[in-house]
Image (cartoon, rainbow, N blue to C red):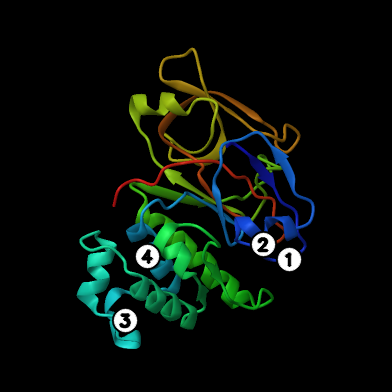
Amino acid sequence: MYIFLFLYTSEASIYTSLVLLHDTPHILLYSFPLYLILNDSIMIKLQKASERIKFARYLTGLDRKEVEQRFSINYNTLQSWELERNPLSLRGAEKLSKAFLSEGVLCSTAWLLTGEGSLPSFITNCDNALHTEMNIFREIESFKTINPDPIVTLISDNSMYPLLEIGDYVGGTRLYSDQILELSGKVCVIETTDGVTLVKKLLYSSSSYSFNLISFDLDSEDEPILLDVKIASAAEVVWIRKQGSVKSMCSRASLPAT
């Protein structure tokens, strides 16, 4: 099933469970590939229990040794789950869920075992700026850890409004050379050969190995369309961390093997 979720809320964060989305006001549905929502973010789907364990642990900010020291979960056992050497048991999932909860991350046993149910979410006071910044940092580091050759950048203008606004973070996996052609028509984080990082819609140009870069808001800047730009790398935006009120895009992607 393909859906596009466009969410508006006055809160600093949104519900992270797809099951609870009906409780969020003003949900509009459009046709678009499905991504999962994580704490104001768009996050690629975690298909394996090993990936879900690692991701939830990254959100706590703990390494395996710290998990062992604080919660008596054996280092080697945790490593074997995260490296898929041994399957996660129900008892193991329950111990992990309690450990993550103690660190301020709500993560259900069912989600760890099957991927079904509510996605992990932070338990914080949304008015606490320090907690918010720490959450953003953890999510960025988690995204970088589970993606090959990642790039994350901060949106500094409103040229891609309404999808992106000043203060949002976006991320993707870099592609190079001929692989960039696969991204024509997509919103990307782009690194030009001049060393400039931009977030634009990417369109292939008729000029050799050049691209046209398109803004969504044509009135937001002097040059909303950049023609025949030479590109060093491009990464399709597959992760969005919204600041303040939330407008979240959902689509589908696969998680690279770890």
* Mark 2 lies on residue: 14
**Which residue does the numbered mark 3 point to in the structure image?**
66
- Indicate the position of residue 61 as horizontal and vertical percent values: 41, 73
Depth check, mark 4 against mark 1: the one in front is: 4
Q: CA distance from mark 2 to mark 1?
A: 7 Å
Circle on res. 11: 1
Quickly name the residue at label 4.
Answer: 53
Along the horizontal axis of the image, is 52 left or right of 247?
Answer: left
Which comes sooner in the sequence, label 3 or label 1? 1
Q: Earlier in the sequence, mark 2 or mark 4?
A: 2
Q: Are the residues tagged 2 and 1 within 8 Å (C-beta)?
A: yes
Image location (x, y in percent) of residue 145? 36, 58
Considering depth in this image, is 168 or 119 the residue closer to the camera? 119
How far apart marks 4 and 1 lie (CA) works out to 28 Å
Q: Find residue 198 and name its label.
A: none
Q: Mark 4: which amino acid? A: Ile
Q: Residue furthest top?
A: 206
Q: Which quadrant of the figure contains the N terminus?
A: top right
Between residue 242 and residue 51, name the one nearer to us.
51
Q: Earlier in the sequence, mark 4 or mark 1?
A: 1
Judged by depth in the image, the label closer to the viewer, 2 or 4, is 4
